[in-house]
């Protein structure tokens, strides 16, 4: 959530940067925010003035009572009662206005960093790096959804029977490969200084709001109505919310956490060839890295987090590229995002396997995640997160790129975790 004072003091800059994110009706919404906040200020002044007048009268009533002027004191009490009633009405009005301001603010996306390019679609993202050699497959090579059936390692039809489409069942070496990748990613994260946490996979509304999933992505989240809880779309939500309503020491920063969780996304509206096999699931596994950082260091940290995820792809020997997302392809809360994509040799297309983002103060303002600076003044921290990595498309690329006529080779980096170096 943007800070109200920043909007008031930098209206033209806010509108200019919101245009990069293609935020519709930006000027009308920002004008409404400022107008409502002016009304809030005026109502607050009325409230304060009324309280002050009532306090003065209360002291005067005490003096009159002491002086024995009961009749005048009683008349003044009637005036005080009227002021108290007005004060109550003004307090109620103020709460309504504050809620209206808040309701407007939560509809405004984060401002993109100055380096974020303009654009409306993924085709306008900037390719920052492309690395690795795209493998040439043998004649008769198959896409991963045929390989998983051939070697009986992932069963999509059984998942449909048990739950529905988008909930595959991993079997045998497929299940062991999943477990191996999770452990490999976690070990790499902890070796890089991240503290492993195992958070809940259901969160309350406050947590969903704190990281910006609510109200922006409410329709994409699975909801448990009876308990008013949401299944997490990413470990970013519970891990970042660890620091909700927390005031940190400046010396605590940066804080590095990582965690493995299953993730749940409804993926409403997804259809067509891009959803085949592991390309788009409702439940999938992911290792997430999260940092709470000093504002002056967060963009240097963003580059470090990007390198961490890229190094994992190098370890897995997967051709990949790094994209800087344009304004129109960025998430609601991000100030800057890099996507990492791997090459899927059988599908002949790039598959996104990680997003690494700096949210600046957008999440921490909602979370009230702050630190005390060297002068003892309370400041908002910056929050960052990244996939390191999401498993489904990694597995898809590993299966497709490493297939041979005799089986599927497992990269050396993860073979030791699997206990095998070939699926056949």
Image: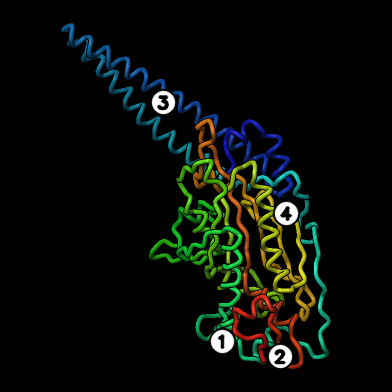
Residue 124 visible to the viewer: no
Q: Which is closer to the viewer, label 3 or label 1?
A: 1
Asked which secondary structure carries label 2, the reply is: strand
- Residue closer to the observer: 388 or 190: 190
Residue at screen point 73% across, 51% down: 327
Looking at marks 2 and 4 on the same chain, the residue that comes earlier in the sequence is marked by 4
Tell me which corner region of the image, top left, top right, bottom left or bottom right, holds residue 16: top right
Residue at screen point 71% across, 57% down: 338
- Residue closer to the observer: 198 or 339: 198
Judged left or right of residue 183, residue 98 is left
Looking at marks 3 and 1 on the same chain, the residue that comes earlier in the sequence is marked by 3
Judged left or right of residue 35, residue 318 is right
Asked which secondary structure carries label 1, the reply is: loop
Q: Which residue is mark 4?
A: 328
**Tag 2 and tag 3, C-beta contact below 8 Å:** no
Q: Residues within 10 Å of mark 2 (few under 14, many from 20)?
A: some
Question: Residue 207: percent from the left, percent from the top?
Answer: 48, 55
Residue at screen point 54% across, 33% down: 374
**Tag 2 and tag 4, C-beta contact below 8 Å:** no
Q: Which is closer to the viewer, label 4 or label 1?
A: 1
Looking at marks 3 and 4 on the same chain, the residue that comes earlier in the sequence is marked by 3
Q: Which residue is mark 1?
A: 171
Query: How was the colour assigned to the protein in this rendering?
Result: rainbow
Asked which secondary structure carries label 4, the reply is: helix
Q: Which residue is mark 3?
A: 47
């Amino acid at each position: 959530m943007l800070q109200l004072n920043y909007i008031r003091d930098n209206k033209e800059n806010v509108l200019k940067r919101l245009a990069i994110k293609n935020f519709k009706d930006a000027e009308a919404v920002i004008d409404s925010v400022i107008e409502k906040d002016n009304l809030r200020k005026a109502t607050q002044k009325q409230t304060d003035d009324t309280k002050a007048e009532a306090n003065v009268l209360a002291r005067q009533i005490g003096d009159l009572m002491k002086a024995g002027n009961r009749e005048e004191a009683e008349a003044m009490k009637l005036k005080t009662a009227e002021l108290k009633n007005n004060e109550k009405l003004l307090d109620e009005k103020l709460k309504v206005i504050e809620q209206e301001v808040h309701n407007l603010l939560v509809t405004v996306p984060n401002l993109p960093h100055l380096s974020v390019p303009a654009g409306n679609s993924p085709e306008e993202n900037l390719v920052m790096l492309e690395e690795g050699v795209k493998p040439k497959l043998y004649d008769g090579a198959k896409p991963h959804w045929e390989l998983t059936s051939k070697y009986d390692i992932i069963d999509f039809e059984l998942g449909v029977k048990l739950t529905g489409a988008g909930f595959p069942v991993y079997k045998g070496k497929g299940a062991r490969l999943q477990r191996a990748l999770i452990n490999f990613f976690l070990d790499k994260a902890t070796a890089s200084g991240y503290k492993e946490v195992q958070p809940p996979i259901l969160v309350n509304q406050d947590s969903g709001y704190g990281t910006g999933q609510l109200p922006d992505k409410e329709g994409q989240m699975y909801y448990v109505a009876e308990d008013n809880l949401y299944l997490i779309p990413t470990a970013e939500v519970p891990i970042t919310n660890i620091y909700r309503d927390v005031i940190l020491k400046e010396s605590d920063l940066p804080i590095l956490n990582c965690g493995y969780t299953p993730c749940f996304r409804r993926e409403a509206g997804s259809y067509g060839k891009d959803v085949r096999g592991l390309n788009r699931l409702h439940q999938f596994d992911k290792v997430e890295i999260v940092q709470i950082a000093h504002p002056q260091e967060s963009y240097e940290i963003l580059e470090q987090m990007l390198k961490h995820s890229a190094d994992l792809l190098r370890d897995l020997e997967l051709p990949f590229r790094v994209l800087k997302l344009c304004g129109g392809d960025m998430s609601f809360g991000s100030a800057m995002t890099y996507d990492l994509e791997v090459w899927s040799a059988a599908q002949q297309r790039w598959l996104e396997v990680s997003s690494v983002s700096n949210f600046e103060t957008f999440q921490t303002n909602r979370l009230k995640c702050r630190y005390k600076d060297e002068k003892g003044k309370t400041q908002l921290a910056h929050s960052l997160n990244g996939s390191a990595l999401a498993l489904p498309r990694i597995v898809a690329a590993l299966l497709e790129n490493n297939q041979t006529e005799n089986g599927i080779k497992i990269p050396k980096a993860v073979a030791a975790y699997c206990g095998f170096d070939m699926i056949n």
